[in-house]
Image: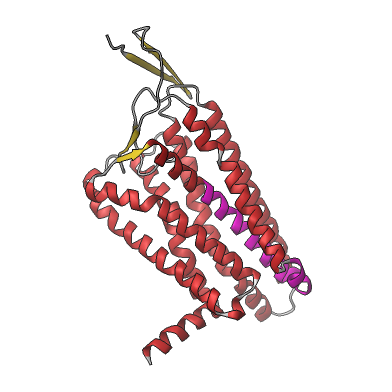
Amino acid sequence: MQGTLFCLRFGHLLMCSISDSNTTDFINPSTFILLGIPGLEMAHVWISIPFCVMYTVALLGNFIILFIVKKEPSLHEPMYYFLCMLAITDLVLSTSILPKMLSIFWVNSRKIDFSACLTQMYFIHCFSAIESGIFMVMAYDRYVAICDPLRHSTILANHNVTKIGLAVLLRGIMLILPYPLLARRWPYSGTNIIPHSFCEHIAVVKLACADIRISSYYSLAVAFFVIGMDVFFIIMSYTQILRAIFSLPTKDARVKTFGTCVSHVCVILAFYIPTLFSSITHRFGHNVPLYFVILIANVYLLVPPMLNPIIYGVRTRQIRDRLLQIFTHKGT
């Protein structure tokens, strides 16, 4: 006779027992069920419209950035190399979640294979960490360009830019790799329903019938290490930048110099504010409605990839001029 599973959760510990002693093996589910945005199921189709628009703009905008930088020799500089890294990261990040999300919203296709779920989890968190690292090195690029301009071409020579890019990439890959490895080893003998629109790490491991404190504490440590370190170095860079700007003799010089940093400041705020808000509400906002937490999680993964190319396209004269040239030639 098949045993009955009883589960009680105490904090991060999910105590499970089976009434039949012959049924003691725990197995991982073959699939998970993503609910989308619980509480807003009737509005899924309407919610998908702005999400689809944001994804389309992100795809178009980031591909345009990559195309312009590739075709324009004057943009073959460290700042634009980092911008290309950011564009590729944004493309991967938004593509990791939206196609599956739209299948949930449009055709109610909620099943996702266990391995596919872990793969999605890895790509989301890995490229979020990479994006944060890119913002940090872009802040360093602005610091060197403003505070030590004579050595900028030496410090950020092409081979150094390559090394920095590889370091940021490897950091994201190695730090996030334990997420799916730990999640795979937990037993999932209870529900396989994920109350989320994508396979977010904590949302997945919370379903495990085991003590998941290792996963929880590790994810917190990674968040503090990655975001904490990156934000610290960004603040330090801009502190030195502001000192250099305020030491300039004229107001026009100060405004012009700070104008070169405005694009970067805007994309930093667009990334970190919803990221931090989502992380705080997901872990500590017990009184916040679940649908609101999930909407914010989607916003921080979809809005920055959409805004980054728009902000840089509008604020960066070289990109704006090159884009106008393309459309002017096509119109003549």
- The answer to which image quadrant residue 152 occupies is bottom right
Question: Which residue is at 51% across, 63% downward?
Answer: 87
Task: Report x, y in % for residue 165.
Answer: 63, 58
Residue shown at 46% from the left, 54% from the top? 93
Q: Which residues are magenta?
A: 126-155
Q: State which quarter of the image contains the N terminus.
A: top left
Q: Estimate the x, y position of residue 115 in percent, counting from the top left.
A: 42, 38
Above or below: residue 324 compared with residue 217: below
Q: Residue at x 71, y 70 (%)?
A: 146
Farthest residue to the bottom: give it: 332
Q: Is residue 143 above or below residue 24?
A: below
Q: How many marks?
A: 0
Q: Is residue 238 visible?
A: no
Measured from the top left, where is residue 94 in percent x and y? 42, 55
Q: Is residue 192 in view?
A: yes
Nearer to us in this view, 34 or 50:
34
Q: Is residue 293 magenta?
A: no
**Of 98 and 217, the residue lying toward us:** 98
Q: Is residue 30 left or right of residue 152?
A: left
- Dominant secondary structure of the magenta stretch? helix
Q: Quadrant of the C terminus?
A: bottom left
Q: Quadrant of residue 139?
A: bottom right
The residue sitting at 43% across, 24% down in the picture is: 187
Q: Along the horizontal axis of the image, is 59 left or right of 238?
A: left
